[in-house]
Image (cartoon, helix red, strand yellow):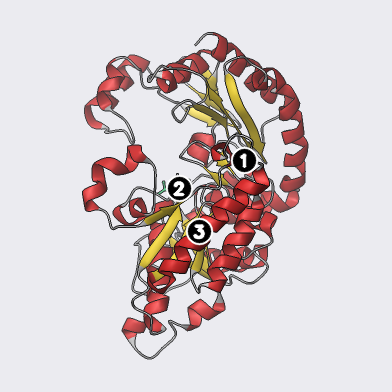
Amino acid sequence: MNNKYLMERSLKTVWHPCTQMKQHEVLPLVPIARGEGAWLYGFQGERYLDAIGSWWVNLFGHTNPRINAAIREQLDKLEHVMLAGFTHEPVIELSERLGNLVSGKLGHCFYGSDGASAIEIALKMSFHYWHNSGHPEKNDFVSLQNGYHGETLGTLSVTDVALFRDTYAPLLRHSAHVLTPDWRYAAAGESAEDYTQRAAAALEAHLAQHHAETAALIVEPLVQGAAGMGMYHPDYLKLARQICDKYRVHLIADEIAVGFGRTGTMFACEQAHITPDFLCLAKGLSGGYLPLSVVMTTDSIYQAFYHDETTHGFLHSHTHAGNALACRAALATLDIFEHDDIINTNRVKANYLNHAVQPIASHPTVKNFRNCGMIWAFEVETNDPAFAGRFFQAALAQELVLRPLGNTVYFMPPYIINEQEMDLLAAGTLRALDSC
Ligand SMILES: *Cc1c(COP(=O)(O)O)cnc(C)c1O
């Protein structure tokens, strides 16, 4: 297959996400023929290490034999049945196992197809809970500065990333954004602890004034992904939980990017020893194979909807909710976590990569080198507004898929990455930095 032929056909008919299509006059599309393990392969023998897990979804490599086998087996039994009025084994087993993973406190699973739909579900469910409980005036949300929760109209309202939000602002609902706990925003000389306290105080000041009309606080626990991998201390989550309890406001944990081991624990909230009222999961949930998302919530929230009246029930549906193939992929993914003791083996891998990347951390143009679990990020000092595109190209030339967010370069490798591949990642990134 000829690369140029595929690029031309693709550009004629495929409108690519988050892309100024005109940029493809100079930035070639990358046709991919197949994937295997941590690698993506082109049609002419090119190969690229997928160091960002295909937009943060891929946990155990491409065409993973165990996930493939599970999907194949399911394919011959049941590919899909609607979840309204029907049920099936994969969705039951997945709900049970997810419930056990989060200590049994979030035992009710509501399914969607992608991350944004999970956030829409959590927002609507929180509002509807208050409505059913005699507080329909609680219909506002508060989120964090630099937060990202998706790009549908509802989720953009609680998102604070100018690139995604500004153009569509007239379509959005007003929503408050409070000071981010991301330590890069600490004042000069301010300790991380003091900054965490200051961010929590800003949240408290907001809720002290607005709790009566606020349904929920929504956060990305520990790592604010899309705004540039901003990292913060688990103490903030602990304080946020206390503040939400004090003011009777729900806490929605958007673990779409950070769930499933990304921050070093199965779920990021574990590091703060808290349970949110709603836990949103997607991306890695199916090992990155199929679109699947879930919102997990508590029994007390579930009970507020359990009633003789139809309109007391949660009135929301996505056609492909709980798709059997996607649930089966998710079950195979959970099997791998268990059988291969992934959380612990990832710790060893993270140590290895932390050593290998030392020359990057001390590179003269690199700032704020940081790591949380299986996420690494750093800023590159540059005045070039086209840096991200140029670095992407420079990384491809080193057989690496790296797609900076502005001037933030990050790694989110699949967990099957081995030492040799981590060495390639570190050395190739250094060469890309030098050539760019
Ligand atoms: C990716 C992401 C979403 C949106 O998920 P989609 O599947 O792209 O709709 C929401 N929140 C966070 C934190 C994400 O990283």
User: Residue at point 52% right, 65% down?
Assistant: 251
Q: Position of residue 109 (x, y in %)?
A: 51, 68
Q: Closer to us: mark 3 or mark 2? A: 3
Checking the image for residue 60, the label placed there is 1
User: Residue at point 65% right, 16% down?
Assistant: 427
Q: Is residue 411 visible?
A: yes
Which of 17/184 is in front? 184
The answer to whether residue 16 is above or below residue 296 is above
Q: Position of residue 241 (x, y in %)?
A: 59, 64
Task: Answer few, some or many: residues within 10 Å of disc 1's Cα (few below 14, many 20 plus, some between 14 and 19).
Answer: many
Instruction: Give how far apart the Cα atoms at labels 3 and 2 are.
Output: 14 Å
Residue closest to the far front: 189
Q: Secondary structure at mark 1?
A: loop
Which of 331/161 is in front? 161
Residue type at numbered disc 3: Leu
Checking the image for residue 203, the label placed there is 3
Q: Secondary structure at mark 2?
A: loop
